[in-house]
Amino acid sequence: MRTSKWVLISYTLIILVGLITALPNLFTPAQLASLPGWIPKQQVTLGLDLQGGSHLVLEVDAATLRQDRLKALLEDVRGVLRTERIPAQSARLSGDTVVLSIADQATRERALTKIRELAVPIANTAMGASIADIDVATDGNAIKLSLSEAGFKDRIDRALEQSLEVVRQRVDQVGVAEPSIQRVGSDRILVQLPGLQDPTRLRQLLGSTAQMSFHMVAENVTGDRPPAGVTMLPDSKTGQLYPIEDRVALSGDRLTDARAGFDQRTHEPIVSFRFDSAGARQFADITAQNVNKPFAIVLDGKVLSAPVIREPITGGSGQISGSFTVEDTVVLSALLRAGALPAPLTVIEERSVGPDLGADVIQMGIYTGLAGFALVVAFMIALYGWWGLIANFALFLNVALTVGLLSILGATLTLPGIAGIILGIGIAVDANILINERIREETAKGLSSFAALDRGFKMAYSTIVDANVTTLIATGLLFMFGSGPVRGFAITMIIGIAASMFTAVAVVRILMTEWVRRRHIKTIRMEPLIRFMPKETHISFMRARFLGIGISLLLSLASIGLFIKPGLNYGIDFTGGIQVEVVTSQPADLAQMRGDLSALNLGEVALQEIGGDNHVLIRLQRQEGGEAAQTAAVNAVRDTVKTIDPDVRVERTEVVGPKVSGELAQNGIIAVVLAALAMLVYIWWRFEWNFAIGAIATLILDTTKTIGFFALFGLDFNLTAIAALLTIIGYSVNDKVVVYDRMRENMRLYKKKSLREIIDMSINQTLARCIFTSATTFLAMAPMAIWGGSAVENFAVPMVFGIVIATSSSIFIAAPILLFLGNWWEHRQAGRLGGHELPEPMQKA
């Protein structure tokens, strides 16, 4: 039980570094500046759900990018035919292929040679060679050109990199503080902007390709069917159609600057622009040759304005005017300065949170966290007296080290992350309960203080490791398949579990050893201040095994029925659509609100009161018509609610596309299935096959009951609910490991006892620690479940239910299943030996 001074020094340094790095989170930025220079200034980064802001996921429009490339390829082919004077019957675009028809074989071969020169080599590091970006093939008289897989992948990659830079420049133009813009996967960009509450302008800013060009307006065009080379384009404001020549007179690439301003004569908002030297010459030539003719300025297929050229413009600058607001000119000038996107970006996911809601959530998290911590501290003192104070000190270190590690890693703390810290408080103290109960047990056998400490820590260690590994499996999979705030929960839990292994085992061991040594304690007495349970129990749990399994099966079948009808209340994460959370100044009139919103003809409208009669959640189906339709729907909802209550406050807005919702649902199912399989393998490896099957069978029953709980109370089943479900799975197996570990130990010690006797003995021996460990986690989560509000009810409430289910199933379900499997295996082995009883049936079972 002695610890070397180097280990003590190392532990002390770890604790000091953890406390110092956690310290800055207690101060405001202004207070931090006045602290000594040796104190680190890095604080935990708050997620958008805590500080307010907007979160958007943009996806490169691959279909448009492909079509643009094919159209350019078609023009290149026609250019080659003109240059080489090769006659062709036709050159057209057919689906995703450019088809060129040439009847003469010699001419076709000559064309084929020249067309192959259009291919651009793409480096292929995997094969150590280059691959062409287009595939050229012949089919009779036809030459077919298509984009190669490697070439198109390379084009998307380059488009995404270019888009990333353009998006960054556009965000910088509007002056958002500390934006986070990063690539996600092969074709997506994640944009997080703290403090930006209304994402409408942001959606307009980022979703626009900003491909600007100047065209002549065709003359003498009547009707809706223009001649070849002319396209009818709408006005960006009024929708009036203009006959615009397809030929680009001047490309927007020649722009060097664009600024929002006001016309000195009319005082209306305008955008002034300037060309580079080449563009200025072209602009002067065009205006000189087309005096008194209309000249259209086109942005993304819409006419911004079509002024008549009054005189040649030779200064290389001009202005765009129209029915613009000041905000319109600011956004448009930012778009033109940043340049055009190589392909449209589709907003497939959007979430925004107001700063007031974020502040309320932080306050709620602090209050419920402190309440949970206080309940756990009081419970530990009641259980173990002064020895409980050592566990409480370790618990304080655990929270401090978790916050310190989050600060060092620059991790983002989200609302589920706060829930993870609170849940970690209960799980961290579980290890101390296992150790203290084992020390009590060894002391009752007559061991001295140091012997009891040594054996208590040694025997509890494997149980603690097994229990934490099962929880890590669940949280690890949650990190792999989760997204956004849910990944924040997983990171917090992983850090908290790692910190608890250090504080609850290493630190507590040293503190308890030093206390015994300095106080010269011969025998450890951990007498509770309040005795919650008798010292020993001799309950025959297996006598009620059929009743326990029967009730469990009945509840699971009822849960499956609830899953079928009325079914789960799937959240926007899994169904897609629009969700707006508002707070009215007076109790909300849901009937009037529903009627006014239904009159907007946006499809089915669902209203739900959450957290009070003035807190309303509005849900709409995803609108037809692309991203502009989603923006219009959100704005219409906001305007309608404000007409009902001018003082209404929009707390949160979410728009999730069908692609994202499908991916989230698929990832959630994969995570749950993989978690169950991983735990099956781990328990099989650590114990025996019958233990693993017993744990997984019980886990299935626990999971079905939890899903039934969601269906019964109509809780939103979303990403946070998946986080709760995976955590319950991990906790459920965690709880069973405690009982299984004692069963395995007793099976080695009492080889002559029957399996039923060993199971009853093991449950009685571990009953107190099972109940006490669950009680600490229950007490840590209960304040959040009661006072946390709608923001965390999908996590905290099911967790409290799951803790109760996991504890009861460890005693009344997992153990009887293990007994049935053991007896079945014993009879099977006996049958193979010709009906003779096995001499050591327990080892075989």
Image (cartoon, rainbow, N blue to C red):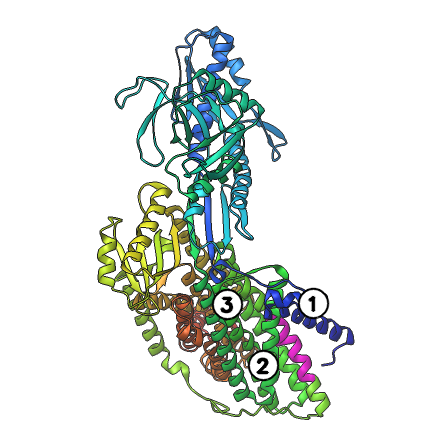
Q: Earlier in the sequence, mark 2 or mark 3?
A: 2
Q: Quadrant of the N terminus?
A: bottom right
Q: Is residue 140 above or below residue 536?
A: above
Label 1, residues with CA under 10 Å away: few <14, some 14-19, many ≥20: few
User: Residue 392: which numbered mark, if any?
Assistant: 2
Q: Residue furthest front?
A: 265
Judge depth for marks 2 and 1 and give the one in front: 1
- The answer to whether residue 805 is visible is no
What secondary structure is marked by label 3? helix
Q: Quadrant of residue 458?
A: bottom right
Residue placed most toward the observer, 315 or 492: 315
Residue annotated with mark 3: 418
Reading the image, the residue beneath label 1 is 39
Determine the CA span between mark 3 and mark 1: 25 Å
Of the image marks 2 and 1, the number of the one nearer the N terminus: 1
Label 3 vs label 1, nearer the camera: 1
Decide: marks 3, 1 in contact (CB < 8 A)?
no
The magenta stretch is 498-513
Q: Position of residue 369 (x, y in %)?
A: 50, 74
Question: Which residue does the image show at 52% across and 66% down from the upper left?
Answer: 470
